[in-house]
Image (tube, grey):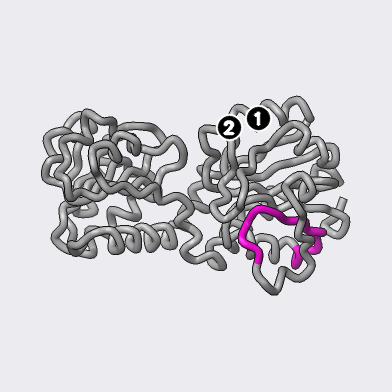
Amino acid sequence: MSWNNTVIAVVAGDAREQEIARCAVRAGAAVRAYGFPWPDEGIEGVYHAKDAADALKGADIALFPIPGITAEGALFAPKCPEKIIPTHEMLAGMNKPGHIILGWGDANLKGHCEALGITLHEYEWDVDLMLLRGPAIVEGVLKVIIENTQITIHKSNICLVGQGTIGSLLTNTLVALGAHVHVAARNPVQRAAAYAAGAESLTLEQLPEYLPKMDIVIGSVPKRLLEREQLQLLPKHALLVDVAAPPGTIDRDAAAELGLKTVWARGMGARAPITVGRSQWSGIVRRIAGILEQQS
């Protein structure tokens, strides 16, 4: 099996997927696409399918978005007019043995793939790819903060919950911009790294003591850690920004009921779709090469 007779379906996503589709064409694959913003001029060499099932029909490999799947099982597709929820019938149109490369799959998708003999390749937690798209995510978060506050980042009190790859990049940037940054994390090594970067480090248990002083709270852990009990301690002007994959760090329904402005900043990598699309492709192409090598 070579690139020249490989059919790749690019399904759902945002403007990053345009660049990923172009990269797949340049690699020599036949590309079918649906569910991401389609440019007026089209994408040379890419078949624009009528729906997700049409895009997946006859595909050897499907590329789904890196942002996580929603609780109802829908792929990340903010500009698509309908929700794209992979079904058994939809996936059954792929060639056998099929492969899906994506950020991460939920139980529904994994169940269908197991029944159909489709292999899932997840790359949401690849540190190298996270670092490559990290600057665009940080820039996107800064844009969200600036557009949704009436104060400067400089001298503001900001609490970051979580200090993984993206959280640490945000800490470094916000400290450099002059914010008073507080980092709450369970991992003592992450807390020490935040301290070394110039932030004040906290355990999760210390959050109630500091939340009443915060202007901005950023959640970066894909696990609900800020519930109503903690949120009601925040001042009314506080901005909540959740950059985590589903279900997110913040109970956004409770925040809304409490009158707190909340932004679920998913897909921040779309801030620079060409740059981030190419960086994601660098991870995708490694996995496709491995698949083709096994099947040759």
Q: Nearer the viewer, residue 41 or 27?
A: 41
Do the CB atoms of the residues marked 1 and 2 lie less than 8 Å apart?
yes
In what element is the residue under mark 2?
Answer: loop
User: What residue sits 60% from the left and 27% below the top?
Assistant: 107
Relative to 76, residue 143 above or below: below
Q: Please report the residue visible at 77 percent of the width from the left and 44 percent of the height from the top.
A: 53
Residue at image coords 82%, 40%: 93
Q: Which residues are magenta?
A: 25-38
Residue count near mark 1 (Cα–Cα under 10 Å), binned few <14, some 14–19, many ≥20: some
Choose top left, top right, bottom left or bottom right for residue 134: bottom left
Which residue is more in the foreground, 217 or 189?
217
Element type at marker 1? Answer: helix
Q: Which mark is residue 110?
A: 1
**Residue ID at (70%, 54%):** 34
Question: Within the magenta stretch, is there residue 242?
Answer: no
Residue receiving disc 2: 106
Tell me if residue 47 can be seen: yes
